[in-house]
Image: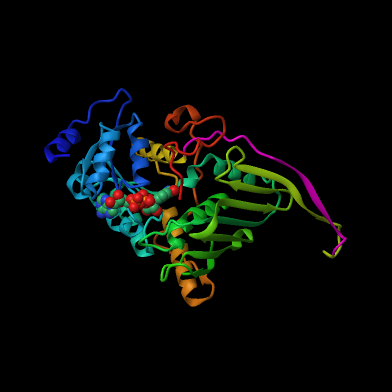
């Protein structure tokens, strides 16, 4: 888009009957950024979306789909005129682009991971604090109604004492050019477990192998220690697996839960299964009663998590309220990723320090947004939309 045209749009993006509005830039409009563009253009509180990408063909195809958007080839060209920016470029560029957005006076939502080092992530949190700007981490699963439901079930104690949580995020690919599987996929599972438990791990032991494509690690196992609740969570990540899996399993003393993000209608299943040892008996064969009860699937109204996330970002800015998955929760995840990297190098467990200067606090719960207000994301009754629809698949 010619510069005079984009400046015309930026100075007069058109009014709205819905009160105050924002001008939002999306830097990086590839697979995931284009979904942010789609979601943001559907929001009445967003007066103008500017798609920003180095690649002119990406911009022209987006402009054909969404004729109302502006386009620009670099954040530097438009940053000063925007209110907020979504950073959806490859991971290694997050720190620099989010810094640039904040220095231009914009609130920023950064895709996972928040940055690729603790130093960069701390800088973003500090800069946001100093300038009174929101820094939000794109922890999409914290805006997923199935994850909300699982968290509620855990908080209600319906599963009993939680023995164990493990997650699996496996597929053949997609190999990323700039980070390994731990930094690409790990943020999802670390943020999910932190969110479910309302806690943060204090140490991590990790193993990863560059099995198929040296030197980038494509398979990894993480053990996250949560001593405050006496729990160890295991995270299995892989770009080298025959089966696509996106699953969280919670094993409790009374019941067990499985959240399968790929399931059609039964994304969350609660199993009435477990063991009941006879009181005082040693756990020997014959003295354990196995409970093999039925299962139930709580109703979950499917709403697109990305639409909820972006709406939360925009509404928090307009209301002057903090964002739920803020920079501190993104920083906490980056601390785990960096400690996991160190653990892989040293071959032993590594403690995670949360630092006194930027105290991360605890993951804030996301208040479910009433279905009627999340129009862009509503789908058929409790189910995922059919494959091939516009909905983004969290990767
Ligand atoms: N939350 C989720 O579930 C989820 C899912 C997929 C991807 N992601 C994240 O989204 C980000 C992008 O992933 P993707 O799969 O869309 O990648 P992609 O390669 O499809 O898109 C990246 C785009 O960024 C552009 N770009 C790179 N550097 C730029 C710069 N400095 N200025 C402007 N444009 C630039 C590229 O031209 C490209 O169009 C990654 O951080 C990834 O972790 C998140």
Q: Report whether residue 173 is seen.
A: yes
Q: Residue furthest bottom?
A: 346
Query: Residue at 18% across / 30% down in the picture?
Result: 12
Where is residue 267 drawn, in percent x and y?
A: 59, 42
- Residue 291 on the magenta span: yes
Q: Residue furthest left?
A: 4
The type of colouring in the image is rainbow
- Tell me the quarter of the image containing the N terminus: top left
Where is residue 118 drawn, in percent x and y?
A: 38, 63
Where is residue 266 drawn, in percent x and y?
A: 62, 40
In magenta, the rendered stretch is 285-304
Q: Residue furthest top?
A: 17
Residue 147 located left or right of residue 255: left
Q: Nearer the viewer, residue 193 or 4?
A: 4
Residue 201 located left or right of residue 391: right
Query: Residue at 69% across / 48% down in the picture?
Result: 159
| Quarter of image, res 23 | top left
- Residue 23 on the magenta span: no
Residue 143 located left or right of residue 152: left
- In the displayed structure, 207 sits above or below 279; it is below
Where is residue 205 drawn, in percent x and y?
A: 54, 69
Q: Nearer the viewer, residue 59 or 172?
A: 172
Q: Report whether residue 326 is seen.
A: no
């Amino acid at each position: 888009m010619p510069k005079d045209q984009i400046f015309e749009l930026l100075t007069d993006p058109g009014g709205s009957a819905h009160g105050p509005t924002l001008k939002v830039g999306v830097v990086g409009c590839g697979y995931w950024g284009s979904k942010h563009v789609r979601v943001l253009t559907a929001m009445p509180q967003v007066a103008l979306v500017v798609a920003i990408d180095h690649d002119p063909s990406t911009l022209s195809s987006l402009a054909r789909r969404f004729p109302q958007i502006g386009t620009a080839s670099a954040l530097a060209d438009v940053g000063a005129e925007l209110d907020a920016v979504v950073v959806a470029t490859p991971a290694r560029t997050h720190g620099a682009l989010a810094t640039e957005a904040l220095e231009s006076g914009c609130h920023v939502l950064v895709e996972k991971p928040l940055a690729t080092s603790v130093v960069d992530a701390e800088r973003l949190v500090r800069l946001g604090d100093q300038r009174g700007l929101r820094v939000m981490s794109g922890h999409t699963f914290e805006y997923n109604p199935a994850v909300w439901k699982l968290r509620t079930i855990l908080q209600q104690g319906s599963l009993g004492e939680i023995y164990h949580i493990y997650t699996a995020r496996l597929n053949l690919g997609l190999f990323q050019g700039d980070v390994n599987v731990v930094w690409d996929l790990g943020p999802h599972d670390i943020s999910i477990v932190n969110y479910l438990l309302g806690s943060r791990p204090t140490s991590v032991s990790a193993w990863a192998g560059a099995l198929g494509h040296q030197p980038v690690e494509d398979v990894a196992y993480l053990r996250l220690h949560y001593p405050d609740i006496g729990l160890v969570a295991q995270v299995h990540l892989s770009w080298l697996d025959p089966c696509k899996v996106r699953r969280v399993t919670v094993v409790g003393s009374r019941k067990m839960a499985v959240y399968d993000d790929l399931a059609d209608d039964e994304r969350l299943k609660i199993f009435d299964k477990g063991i009941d040892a006879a009181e005082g008996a040693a756990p020997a064969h014959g003295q354990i009663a196995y409970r093999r009860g039925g299962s139930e699937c709580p109703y979950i109204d499917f709403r697109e998590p990305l639409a909820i996330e972006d709406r939360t970002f925009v509404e928090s800015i307009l209301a002057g309220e903090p964002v739920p998955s803020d920079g501190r929760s993104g920083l906490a995840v980056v601390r785990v990723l960096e400690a996991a990297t160190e653990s892989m190098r040293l071959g032993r467990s590594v403690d995670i320090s949360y630092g006194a200067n930027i105290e991360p606090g605890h993951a804030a719960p996301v208040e479910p947004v009433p279905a009627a207000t999340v129009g862009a994301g509503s789908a058929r009754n409790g189910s995922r939309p059919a494959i091939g629809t516009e909905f983004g698949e969290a990767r």
